[in-house]
Amino acid sequence: QVQLVESGGGLVQPGGSLRLSCVASGNIFSINDMGWYRQAPGKGRELVATITTDENTNYADFVKGRFAISRDNAKNAVYLQMNSLKPEDTAVYSCNAAVRTTPTLLLRGYWGKGTLVTVSS
């Protein structure tokens, strides 16, 4: 099996910064796209940012210029640097990875359980 574990969430004041980390472990042959999603209280899950294996990135409009996604393929990890945080960024942030567990199997998406980010004064 494959596990994704996020860390780095917490309480931060408006305008502050946080860096989220997500590490994948288990029966991994290769990882393709990785990404961060978030779900605010009472709302659906929404895409925050994605990154391909050759580090092409894609961002939701509401985080462009404030957040930066990166990855370390050697560590099976993806990161999200969040700057200029706003109260509306408060949400549970979850990572996703498209994983192949053997050379012949199709890619399958895996999710972490999420880490809570609260932006409040």
Image: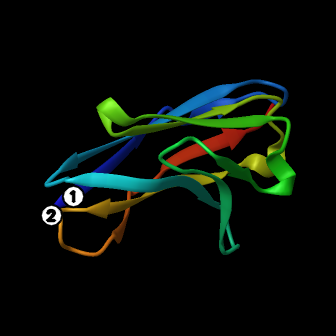
Depth check, front residue: 87 or 97:
97
Residue at screen point 63% across, 46% down? 56
- Residue depicted at x 48% and y 53%: 34
Front-lying residue, 102 or 96? 102
Q: Secondary structure at mark 2?
A: loop
- The number of numbered badges drawn on the structure is 2
Q: Mark 2 or 1, which is nearer the eye?
A: 2
Q: Is residue 41 left or right of residue 54?
A: right
Neighbourhood count class around disc 2 (C-alpha, 10 Å): few under 14, some 14–19, many 20 upward: few
| Amino acid at pointer 1 | Val
Q: Which label belongs to residue 102?
A: 2
Q: In which quadrant of the rendered image does the C terminus lie?
A: top right
Measuring from the top left, give residue 49's x and y in whole percent.
66, 52
Horizontal side of 26 relative to 69 (left or right) equals: left
- Indicate the position of residue 103 as horizontal and vertical percent values: 18, 63
Q: On the picture, is 59 further left or further right than 94?
A: right
Q: Which residue is mark 1?
A: 2
The one nearer the camera, 57 or 111, is 57
- Which sits in the foreground, 111 or 105? 105
Image quadrant occupied by the N terminus: bottom left
Spatial CA span between label 2 and label 1: 12 Å
* Image-quadrant location for residue 45: bottom right
| 88, above or below 7, in the image | below
Which badge, 2 or 1, is on the more N-terminal residue? 1
**Tag shown at residue 49:** none
Q: Is residue 5 above or below residue 70?
A: below
User: Which residue sits at x=76%, y=48%?
Assistant: 89
Give the residue type that dot 2 points to: Thr
Q: Residue at x 66, y 75 (%)?
A: 44
Q: Position of residue 38 (x, y in %)?
A: 62, 58
What is the secondary structure assignment of the residue under circle 1?
Answer: strand
* Marks 2 and 1 in Cβ contact (< 8 Å): no
